[in-house]
Amino acid sequence: MSNTENQALEFGFQPGDVVQEWLWDDDVDEDLRAELEDYLGEELVDEEYDSGVDGVILWWRDGDDEDELADTIVDAMSLLNEGAPFWVLTPKPGREGAIGPNTLQNAAKTAGMNAATPETVGPDWNGIRLRAFGRGRERER
């Protein structure tokens, strides 16, 4: 299995999934995006996409307030199929745009989500998986 497949599997995505990307900017990890798109066989869809999605990645940087992050999480959840993976990608500690340790936890809680422990997803980015309160089962694989 290639690193690309391993990375995509760690995210919980499958080939053919529609994955919505929120808050893309020119600082994102383009290699990670390309690997995900190659694995999915689909381009990532943007915030304007208005049908159900099989996963979400949300790029978040310091400088915006927690309330805005909570609102963005709620907006991104609105089209997410039940049990589908939801990831917030943030710059690693010490990198420009890194968020404080409680920012995501607090915003996730406000949005009705639990935030997992950060995982490395690229040289400069960590990924934190969110799960809705009360969602006991992930979608079957």
Image (tube, rainbow, N blue to C red):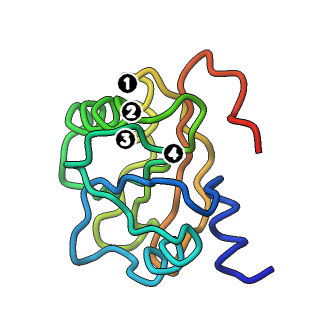
First along the sequence among labels 4 and 3: 4
Instruction: Identify the residue position indicated by label 4 in the image.
Output: 54
Q: Which of the image's four quarters has the N terminus?
A: bottom right
Which of pointers 3 and 1 indicates the residue nearer the eye?
A: 1
The residue lying toward the viewer, choosing from 68 and 47, is 47
Whole-angstrom CA distance, mark 2 to mark 4, is: 11 Å
Q: Amino acid at mark 2?
A: Met
Instruction: Identify the residue position indicated by label 2 in the image.
Output: 77
Whole-angstrom CA distance, mark 4 to mark 3, is: 25 Å
Q: Residues within 10 Å of mark 1 (few under 14, many from 20)?
A: many
First along the sequence among labels 3 and 2: 2
Q: Residue at x 64, y 78 (%)?
A: 4
Asked if marks 2 and 4 touch (Cβ < 8 Å), the reply is no
Q: Residue furthest right?
A: 1
Whole-angstrom CA distance, mark 3 to mark 1, is: 12 Å
Instruction: Identify the residue position indicated by label 3 in the image.
Output: 103
Q: Is residue 102 above or below residue 100?
A: above
Q: Residue furthest top?
A: 134
Instruction: Identify the residue position indicated by label 1 in the image.
Output: 111
The residue lying toward the viewer, choosing from 92 and 18, is 18
Q: Amino acid at mark 4?
A: Asp
Asked if marks 3 and 2 touch (Cβ < 8 Å), the reply is no
Q: Is residue 134 above or below residue 7?
A: above
Q: Amino acid at mark 3?
A: Thr
Asked if marks 4 and 1 touch (Cβ < 8 Å), the reply is no
Q: Secondary structure at mark 4?
A: loop
